[in-house]
Amino acid sequence: MAAGYLDILRARHAARLLAGTLVGRLPNGTAPIAIVLFTRAEGGSYTLAGALAAAYGLATAVGQPLLGRAVDLYGQPRVQLPAAVVSALGMAVLAVAGLGTLPLACAAVIVAGLFTPPLEGGLRALWPSVLGREDRVHRAYAMDAVAQEVMFTVGPLLVTVLVSLWSPVAALLVINALGVLGALWVVLSEPSRAWRSAPREAHWLGALRSPGLLALLGAFFFVGLALGSITVAGVAYADDHGRESVYGWLMAALGLGALIGGSLYGARQWAGAPERRLRGIVALLALCYLPLTLTPGVAAMTALAALAGVFLAPAIACSFIVVDRHAPRGTVTEAFSWLVTTFGVGAAAGTAVAGPAVQLGGTAQGFAVAGAGGVAALLVLLATGKVLAAPGRTPAVVAGSENDRNGAAEPGFSSGHKA
């Protein structure tokens, strides 16, 4: 299993691109906890902290597909690095100005979120040109999903360490400075500088004109909803057991399960259509969410949380393949960015729905939202099976990299920029 991942990391530029992307995404992965800790340290209420974090999340959801489309049109260095700098400046304004002027604080977090660079989608657009073979790209997608779980575990820990050693202001400034350095490390690489999107048809809907992509986004909205609801229900479960540490155990178990599942998924080659495989993985994901409603003792609940995480990273990794198959030509970065946005919006909806569910029906009802989200995702995939069975184009990794400057333009398509 490890040999397959080492084979990818030994490929020229691969380790640099993965590491740079993870570091570059630290501000996005840690923003909610960093904003909350900063707001509380400045004397703001939890309500204000939640509002600022929500404003950041909403702005990010809006900005990702827009910036992804800009990357497809103008290339990675022209968009990723300037966006990272502007986003970091937004957070710097928040850190320096504080909460004395609330409109300025709100504007700062909105700017920071809106200009969060689409490094995640950009990396997936680069894998075909860096790795070449289809099996290696698919394994890289799985490694990418696993690395995300590690980042979302280590990132908040890094913020809390910076806060304890220095201050919430220092945490905001350091994390965002690291984000700019990560983006810089990516865009200075040869693959990022050379990458060009395939010629694209001029259409205001961009990637969203693909029915298959819309079906996938609909399903992953509910996967995000399920995951978001677990974070709220987990807090309620910890409160029921009188120990805040229980929440940490549940989230760590969820991440460990995803780490194991993603590692195993990427260790082998899979036959058959990825759309059919995705339905099976999401069915297992939904099945593993349902037992959480039993809310047993801490040890058993931790085991159930780990089980619930096992199929998350494989579902995400498989979704990357489906995106590549259904994204209209020349929109690959935008399409991946839409997946990030939809998943994030779903997670936000899950936290919003789980709160009232816990208040009205108890902790079990909060976890029931997760089960319902998993089932809804499966139903969307089943209902749109015919649409998903007809990919809109041959995947870039098979037909040739979108980095191929000599590739012939597809008839009827016009390039948005010069290669």
Image (cartoon, rainbow, N blue to C red):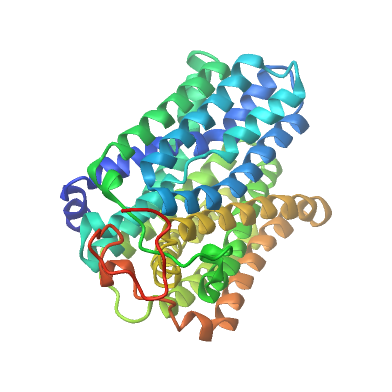
Residue drawn at point x = 55 percent, y = 15 percent: 167
163 left or right, relative to 19: right
102 left or right, relative to 93: right
Count of numbered badges drawn on the protein: 0
Q: Position of residue 309 (x, y in %)?
A: 48, 57
Residue drawn at point x = 30 percent, y = 64 percent: 138
Q: Quadrant of residue 40?
A: top right
Q: Nearer the viewer, residue 296 or 164?
A: 164
Q: Quadrant of residue 53?
A: top right
Residue drawn at point x = 73 percent, y = 51 percent: 352
Q: Position of residue 292 (x, y in %)?
A: 61, 60
Q: Is residue 286 above or below residue 359?
A: below
Q: Nearer the viewer, residue 382 or 197?
A: 197
Q: Position of residue 209 (x, y in %)?
A: 55, 70
191 left or right, relative to 207: left
Residue drawn at point x = 33 percent, y = 82 percent: 272
Q: Is residue 228 above or below residue 54?
A: below
Whether residue 69 appears in this view of the structure is yes
Q: Position of residue 88 (x, y in %)?
A: 51, 28
Q: Quadrant of residue 219?
A: bottom right
